[in-house]
Image (cartoon, rainbow, N blue to C red):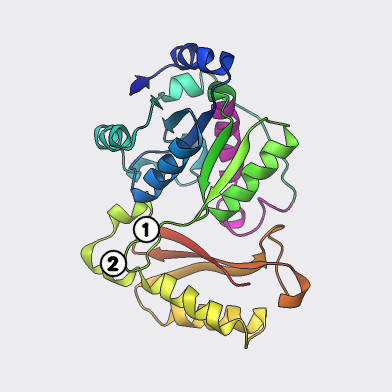
Amino acid sequence: MEIFNTIITTQSYLAPFKKNNKTIGFVPTMGALHQGHLALVKQAKAENDIVVVSIFVNPIQFNNKEDLLKYPRTFETDASLLEAEGCDVIFYPDESQMYPEPDQSVYDFGLLDKVMEGKFRPGHFNGVAIVVKKLFDIVLPDKAYFGEKDYQQLQIIKALVEHKNIPVTIIPCPIYREDDGLAMSSRNMRLTAEERKVAPFIYQTLLQAKDKSNQLNPNELTHWVIQQIEENSMLTLEYFEIVDAATLLPVINFNDCQSSIGCIAVFLGDVRLIDNILLE
C-alpha cells in the first residue's frame, strides 16, 4: 500500500494505471474509519483494479469550528485498517495541498442543498462540493463510493457530477449499522457510555415510523416521530423530515412520489447524529 501526501506524487503514481485502462475505485473519507468505511473499500476492491482512499478533514465544510476541532483524527489506525482491507493507495494531504489559496467556488444545487442539513448547516454542502470536485480531479476515478447514511450529501454529489460532466460513476452503498442498529459514524466514538446506550433509540424510532407509514400520512407520521424523540430527555431533535427520495422535496402525500425517505438529525449530548430510512 502506498501513502502519498501531495497531489503531484498521487497523480504520478496513478497515471500509468489510467494509461493502461485500469479501473480506479475511490473512497473519499475524513478518516476515523469504521466498518462502514471499510465496507465501501471492500466493494471498491471487488469492482476495480486499484483502490484509492483519501483521508482529509475538510475544514470548509464545517460551519461549527468546535466540531472541526473535535473531529477525531486517527491516521495510524486508519492506515492499518486500510492495509488489512487491501487498499492500494492512501491520499493523505494537508490543508496547504488542498487549499494553497482560498477556493471561492459557489455551486448552485437548487433546493437540494437548502433543506434539512443545508438549512441547519449553511455553506456545508458548498464545502463538500468543492473538496469532492478537487479530489475527483486529482484521482480521476472510474467509480466513487459513498454511504447512504449521508443521503442528502449523496444526492448533492450526484448533482455535482451531472452539472460538471465529471466522468465518474457514483456508487451508493447501504448504511452500515452496529448490532443494535446505530448507524456507524466517526462521531460515535465521542459518545459517553450512557449516551451510547441511548443512541440506538433513533433507529428504533425510524423502524417504527416505517411500519406506521401504512397507517399515517406524512404530516401525522412526522408529528409522531417528533413526539417519540422529544419524550427521550437525552435526545434533542434538530429535524425529522419526510422527503422525496429523488428530489428531497417535502412529501405531502405518500402516493405523490415513487419513493420517500425519512431523514433525521439528533443531538445526543454535544454529538450530532444523522440517520435515515426508506419509507416506501
Amino acid, disc 1: Val
Amino acid, disc 2: Glu
Q: Mark 1 points at which residue?
A: 271
Split into 4 quadrants, where in the image is the N terminus? top left
Q: Name the residue under label 2.
A: 195
Identify the residue at the far left of this view. 193
Which badge, 2 or 1, is on the more N-terminal residue?
A: 2
Residue 218 sits inside the magenta stretch: no
Q: Give the range drawn in magenta.
A: 111-136
The x and y percentages for residue 270 are: 35, 59
In depth, the one of 30 and 174 nearer the eye is: 174
CA–CA distance between discs 2 and 1?
Answer: 9 Å
45 left or right of 157 in image:
left
Q: Do the residues labelled 2 and 1 touch (CB within 8 Å)?
A: yes
Label 1 SS: strand
In depth, the one of 199 and 226 nearer the eye is: 199
